[in-house]
Image (cartoon, grey):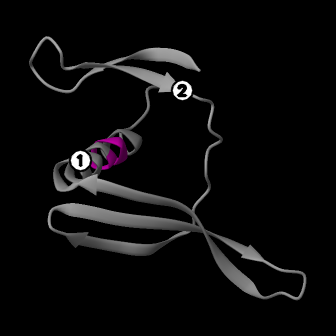
């Protein structure tokens, strides 16, 4: 278990959290299997498409996220910012 940094989650002196990376492998996802909101909690499930030996396609759920609405919107804004950066012209 390696500490890889810290993040501030508020303005108080106790609002610093140590980030721990256990080396979880990255997941590959192809589609949403669930996206819903209930009482301010967003539920998002992701699946990876696979195919068995007979050619039957299936979607294996690989991750389920539950997050407060504020975190979901923060994720949305971060993705939008990444999209803007990726479309900027590169310097020669």
Q: Residue 22, relative to residue 3: is it above or below?
A: below
Instruction: Assign the magenta stretch its main secondary structure.
Output: helix
- Left or right: where does residue 22 sit relative to residue 36? right
Label disc, if present, on residue 21 of the rendered structure: 2
Decide if residue 49 is on the left or right side of residue 38.
right
Task: Tally the numbered discs.
Answer: 2
- Alpha-carbon distance for marks 2 and 1? 20 Å
The answer to which image quadrant residue 69 occupies is bottom left
Label 2 CA crowd tier, 10 Å (few <14, some 14–19, many 20+): few
- Which stretch is magenta? 79-83
Q: Measuring 41% from the left and 42% from the top, which residue is drawn there?
A: 86
Pinpoint residue 42: horizontal percent, then vertical percent.
27, 63
Image side of residue 88 versus residue 60, left or right: left
Residue 14: name its quadrant.
top left
Q: Is 51 placed left or right of 43 in the picture?
A: right
Element marked by disc 1: helix
Q: Which mark is residue 56?
A: none
Q: Residue at x 22, y 61 (%)?
A: 41
- Residue extending farthest to the left is 11
Q: Quadrant of the N terminus?
A: top right
Asked whether 80 falls inside the magenta stretch, the response is yes
Residue 81 part of the magenta-drawn span: yes
* Image position, residue 30 (x, y; %): 57, 67
Residue that numbered label 1 is attached to = 71
The structure residue drawn at horizontal position 16% and vertical position 49%, both measured from the top left corner, is: 70
- How packed mark 1 is, by other alpha carbons closer than 10 Å (few <14, some 14-19, many 20 or more), is few
């Amino acid at each position: 278990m390696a500490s890889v940094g810290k993040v501030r989650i508020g303005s108080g002196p106790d609002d610093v959290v140590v980030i721990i990376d256990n080396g979880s492998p990255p997941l590959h996802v192809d589609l949403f299997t669930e996206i819903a909101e209930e009482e301010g909690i967003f539920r998002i499930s992701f699946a990876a498409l696979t195919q068995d030996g007979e050619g039957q396609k299936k979607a294996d759920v690989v991750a389920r996220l539950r997050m407060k609405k504020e975190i979901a919107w923060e994720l949305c804004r971060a993705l939008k910012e990444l999209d803007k950066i990726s479309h900027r012209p590169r310097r020669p």
